[in-house]
Image: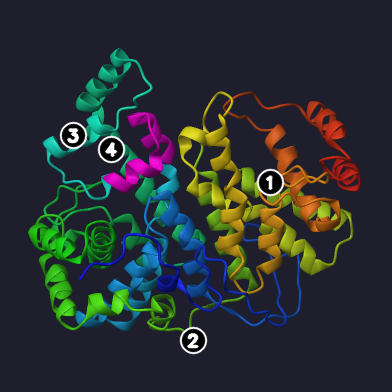
Amino acid sequence: MALPRQYDPQLLAVPQILYLDGTTAATPLAGWRSRSADRTPALQVVGRQPLQTAGILAALSIALDLTEGQLPGHALRTCFIASRLGDEMGLHRADRSALFFAAFLKDAGCSTNAAAVSRIFGGDDIELKREQATIGRSLVAYAAFAIRNLPASEPLPLRLRRLVRLALQGNRERKLVEQARCERGADIARKAGFGPDVATAIRDLHEQWDGRGEPRGLKGAAIDPLARVLAASAALDVFMTTKGAETALRVLASRAGGWYDPDVVHAIQRATERGLLEDLAAPGISERTLQLEPDATARSSDEDDVDRIASAFADIVDAKSPFTGSHSQRVAGIAEALAETLELPVPDRVDARRAGLLHDIGKLGVPNTILDKPAALDEAEFEQIRRHPELTRRILAPIPTFDRVAELGAAHHERLDGRGYFRGLAAPELNLGARIVAVADVFEALTADRPYRAAMSRAQAFEILAAETGDHLASEVVDALRDVV
């Protein structure tokens, strides 16, 4: 049996969880309270019921799938597999709960190494990661992978120099890249509010049973037990969606005792006999995965938790490029201050802040060769950039109470004159919240370093803002910005 290689919206259809098919509406909930994740309580609003943490993570994990070059729903399918293995292996309830959440966040450090992967190989980091996920670890396989992915646009001497560098320094650089990724992923999990069991599972994800993994070269029982389950579960999904189920099972069997814990591979084989693969390919996988959460009533998110998760994902977004170190966090701060200055209701201030945190989450699906290009983009490259607000909207819209956040975040490149992207909205369709996020984004970008220019002073930035006021940016928001900064 082989799973489809193309994205199938039916595999990912679940109430309030939208995976790029645009068909699911969010359900409004009543009442909530809020504060920013990294400071003292600022906004207290009575209200909304706690949200299902798993549902929030399932939606946001789509962005991680895109960054890794995997089909949308990879993290969710990994969660399904890992949860079934936890049952098969008789794991304690607390361990199964940690495994469940670690599956959604396993790639939380993926953006940290995106720029490095692009720099080392000179190509599209997303495509490189997609292919690298299925290559063997022999020198021949790695050399063939490196040669295939040398940038064709580079002169031959530069390509040969790059190949020599990979041969001499490739192992060292790979270890450093993996160390940064794994440690960052664990940090993100902790920031999102999860405990050391989840963080450790993410940190040890790329260790291998025979000690030849990264970054610490742990061996056998020294590797976190949940990480062992998670690694095999992720590999099963990667190989099934790219090469088919039979090949996936054959690869895992051949790597038992090498890459993967033999007991985990045997559990996969037993679960397969019990219908694991058929259940994985059946309709409604998203809803059925969320139902596997061991402590669904114990792990729900109040507004503080939502803010922590949003802030953690903002850090993931900002880590994608060395030129956006704290961009989303700063946009969020400016947007919230503008909303307060313009006397928006408290719920609208919260939405403006969250939109600032997550407005660029769609950029996780854009290669670093484009994000970090030190020259003007060509039309094809700019077309990929124009997609990121649409991806932002599709990722965020299904989360309950995030319908307005999704709209504000998706509109940050729209213009009052209708010449923006991705929908070409004009002034009548852009409310004050959308205008606030747009101004905050432009001002922060102008006053930060970019690959094609140095950061501008505030005075220079306000000169540009003044020139853009009226046709692009809202004058009342730009005026308020002078008071804010």
Front label number (1 vs 2)? 1
Residue behind mark 1: 421
Q: Looking at the image, which is closer to me, 186 or 417?
A: 417
- The amino acid sitting under disc 4 is Arg
| Range drawn in magenta | 114-131
Name the N-terminal-most of marks 4 and 3: 3
Apparent side of residue 42 relative to residue 480 in the rendered image (left or right): left
The mark nearer the N terminus, 3 or 2, is 3
Q: Which residue is mark 4?
A: 174
Q: Residue under label 3, please give it.
A: 144
Among the two numbered marks 4 and 1 on one chain, the one whose residue lies closer to the N terminus = 4
Query: Spatial distance from mark 4 to mark 2, Cα to Cα?
Result: 41 Å
Residue at numbered disc 2: 297
Q: Is residue 129 magenta?
A: yes
Labelled pair 4, 2 in contact (Cβ < 8 Å): no
The secondary structure type at the circle numbered 3 is helix
Q: How is the image coloured?
A: rainbow
Which residue type does callout 1 highlight?
Answer: Tyr
Residue pictured at 75% horizontal, 38% vertical: 443
Q: Whole-percent x and y of residue 346? A: 81, 67
Which quadrant of the structure image shows residue 48? bottom right
Q: Amino acid at mark 3?
A: Ala
Q: Nearer the viewer, residue 121 or 5?
A: 5
